[in-house]
Image (tube, grey):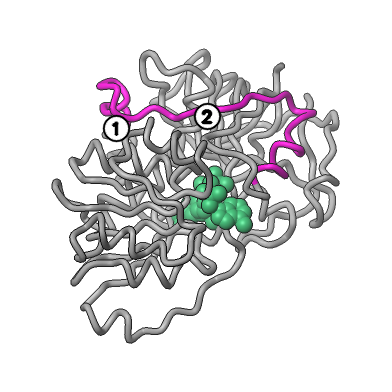
Amino acid sequence: MQALRCHAFGPIANLVVEDIASPAPGAGEVLIDVHAASINYPDTLMVQGLYQVKPPLPFTPGAELAGVVAAVGDGVRHLKVGDRVAASTGTGAFAQQAVAEATRVMPLPDGMDFDAGASFVLAYGTSIHALRTIAKLQPGETLLVLGAAGGVGIAAVQIAKAMGARVIAAASSDAKRALAREAGADETVDYTQAEWRREVERLTDGKGADVVYDAVGGNYAEPALRATAWRGRYLVVGFAAGEIPKLPLNLALLKERAILGVFWGAAMTREPRQLMADLQQLAAWFAEGRVTPPVTEQVPLTGAADAMSRLATRQAMGKLVVRPRG
Ligand SMILES: NC(=O)c1ccc[n+]([C@@H]2O[C@H](COP(=O)([O-])OP(=O)(O)OC[C@H]3O[C@@H](n4cnc5c(N)ncnc54)[C@H](OP(=O)(O)O)[C@@H]3O)[C@@H](O)[C@H]2O)c1
């Protein structure tokens, strides 16, 4: 089968498409014919050796996919050959076949195509975990989302609307802010402008946002924490801007703000039942038309490295999907 391969941690452009042997499913695993796999920011860090997880080399990147079950390992009961599924794999998704742990595989909801399915588990799983379990976002509260047209950001916008919150979306371009509005954002802010947090304060009658979803970090983090309301919750989700911010803790004290970490992958390993409950809620919202991954681009395996580079350099929005079978 064909796969995108990383032989050494380094530039994304060094990734190559190669023929390798198909993986075999072990106990508790399934083999999936991959029809679509979406690109997430951590994929771009992992191949450069910049992510907290460093797989043994060589490896196939790609953390989530959708396709058809081709073989089932011992002990797997809820899946069978021929099932249309979505899965979170950590690595291995940018290939024509991939192995997944059965606990991280869900049947594709009715009406969901492979592109949307491949864009669902990780980004939407992260954002429902962040907003529901960690922030305990309430109907009527205001959520500020940084990087709101990115993968986890746009999922956060849609999920917060499904939960009855008001959403302020921060993004860097007109096109990205338009995509966030299409996803349901009530207001948008250009956070490349100096003093952008004043705009958030204006939109919240000086109060600030009850919850802030920060998957961007860098220089955006401190104004975002300052734009968090009295007893608000500031979610540390990621650092797409590159730098891990160092924040003055008096900003937490002064308004009794809570700074809360979010690590979906680790939480789901510890709490697989919560993962299944979250995925069921997401599937129900999908059926009601409340959450739909905005797939903006599809590329073949040979275009995957280029698409990853664009995502890593802020030139993408929504979800980019790799189709390993053409
Ligand atoms: N904590 C968790 O469990 C968890 C799970 C999944 C992902 N993450 C993290 O969440 C972050 C976003 O992941 P994603 O897959 O949603 O990425 P994505 O689709 O690339 O979105 C990231 C957004 O960050 C913004 N950004 C600002 N500065 C940037 C820069 N220098 N380079 C690239 N983007 C920049 C971009 O929006 P603008 O151009 O509008 O600024 C972009 O849309 C990553 O740091 C990832 O590691 C965390």
Q: Name the residue under label 1.
A: 280
Along the viewing direction, whichever of 252 and 18 lies nearer the viewer: 252
Mark 1 to mark 2 CA distance (whole Å): 16 Å
Report crowding for label 2: few under 14, some 14 to 19, many 20 or more residues within 10 A (C-alpha): many
Please state, as top left, top right, bottom left or bottom right, where the C terminus lies in the image.
top right
Q: What residue type is labelled 1?
A: Gln
Q: Which amino acid does label 2 sit on?
A: Ala
Q: Name the residue under label 2.
A: 118
Residue 304 visible in the snapshot: yes
Residue 265 visible in the snapshot: no
- Which range is magenta? 282-311
Q: Position of residue 42 (x, y in %)?
A: 60, 51
Q: Is residue 72 left or right of residue 77?
A: right
Q: Position of residue 257 (x, y in %)?
A: 25, 74
Confirm or reject: label 2 Cβ below 8 Å from ligand 1: no
Name which quarter of the figure residue 4 lies in: top right
